[in-house]
Image (tube, rainbow, N blue to C red):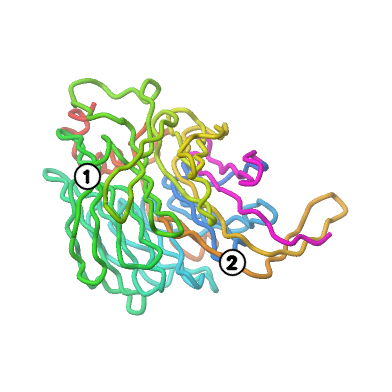
Amino acid sequence: MGIAGASPFAYIANLESNNVSVIDTATDTVTATVNVGNEPSGTAVSPDGTRVYVTNCMSNSVSVIDAAKNKVIDTIYVGSYPLGVAFTPDGTKAYVANTASNTISVIDTATNNVTATVKVGNLPYKIAVSPDGKKVYAVNSGIPPDYQGNVSVIDTSTNNVTATVNVEKDPHGIAVSPDGTKVYVVNSNSYPYYKGTVSVIDTATNNVTDTVNVGSLPHGIAVSPNGTRAYVAIDIPGRYSGKSNIDATSHTGAVDVIDTTKNEVIDRVSVGNYPYEVAVTPDGNKVYVMNYGSNTTSVIDTATNNVNITVPVGRSPTAVAIGPVIKSSSTIGLNGTSFLTPIKQTENQTNDTGMTANGGTAGKQKRESVPTQASIPFLSSIWVLVALLGAVAFVRKMK
């Protein structure tokens, strides 16, 4: 049976379920669930749509999923507590942020080996790659006492950090505009301020040229394919005072919609509890929002900025990546399984996800040790790392 075009799939990493939910964006239904490593926290899809990379923060590894079969076909071991992951546009390299190691692992997707390790700032969290593939931007969350955040700019030809751009405190999310001229960094500005902002960096000068105020405790960000909108997941739509405990089941989060021509919030869309990450479909018609506290994915219609459907997924979804639209041919096997053969990629997403093939084994890369731990609570990706650094006082303040 021939297929003129295959709708992209959304891949959701469920931290506490240790699996990935696969959503068909044409029907907004979960079509598969793939078991991966311990506490998956980042996802990316290869530019040709054939592979999905999933970082497992408590396994110090990356699971490689065959997108046609929805099956893990390999595991690559990287640094400690890997979170963010991204591909170069040509799919030849993948970059992984090792938060507890303060490094970026560079994976050669042809050999599926880690070919370089780049030292960056304190607690690298997420990664974005420029559209031309020449630069990688790693957002570093910072450490006590000041939690000063910054962005490490890496030259992909040399794997050297060529610039460091200071932003605000405790940044989490990062995205590059489709034309490569701007980088958007989400600053949580947590304890004791809780004043969420987005720093706008001019990539030509590596200077922050504007700051956009958003809701409290923001996390992920994604930019529309045409570059006119940015979508920011915020845990608390108002301004959190910091005077009471944060309950992940009692606060309804939202997505702030930024007009990137004016650098101002023009709309706010209510979603589930504690939204963590966002992604935009290649056609720009939908935004997928991971609701950590609700175990759901909200699907926003970008034409109306309304949630059209809410899809139940696994426990504590923390990351999402959406594949490209591809033209395919399909052969139906004897067991009814459809094996898709990609022919042509027509568009790829330009937010802080995106990824390719792999083939490492446990013997290819030595695993770095990390303390064994049970499922971590909301925001624990930072809390655990701070604990690793001995910042017990900060954890008590946050609680």
| 120 or 342: nearer the viewer | 342
Disc marking residue 389:
1
Callout 2, which amino acid? Thr
- Horizontal side of 269 relative to 198 (left or right) equals right
Confirm whether the magenta stretch covers residue 58: no
Callout 2: SS: strand
Q: Nearer the viewer, residue 116 or 293?
A: 293
> In which quarter of the view is residue 58 placed?
top left
Say which residue appears at 25% left-offset and 48% top-offset.
198
Q: Position of residue 38 (x, y in %)?
A: 49, 43
Q: Quadrant of the N terminus?
A: bottom right
Q: Where does the image place residue 79, in percent across and percent down from the top left?
A: 37, 57
The residue mark sitting in front, 1 or 2, is: 2
Segment tinted magenta in the rendering: 1-30
Q: Is residue 224 above or below residue 155?
A: above
Q: Secondary structure at mark 1?
A: loop
Question: In the image, what residue occupies the spot 24% across and 65% down?
Answer: 202
Residue positioned most to the left: 145
Count the marks: how many?
A: 2
Q: Which mark is residue 346?
A: 2
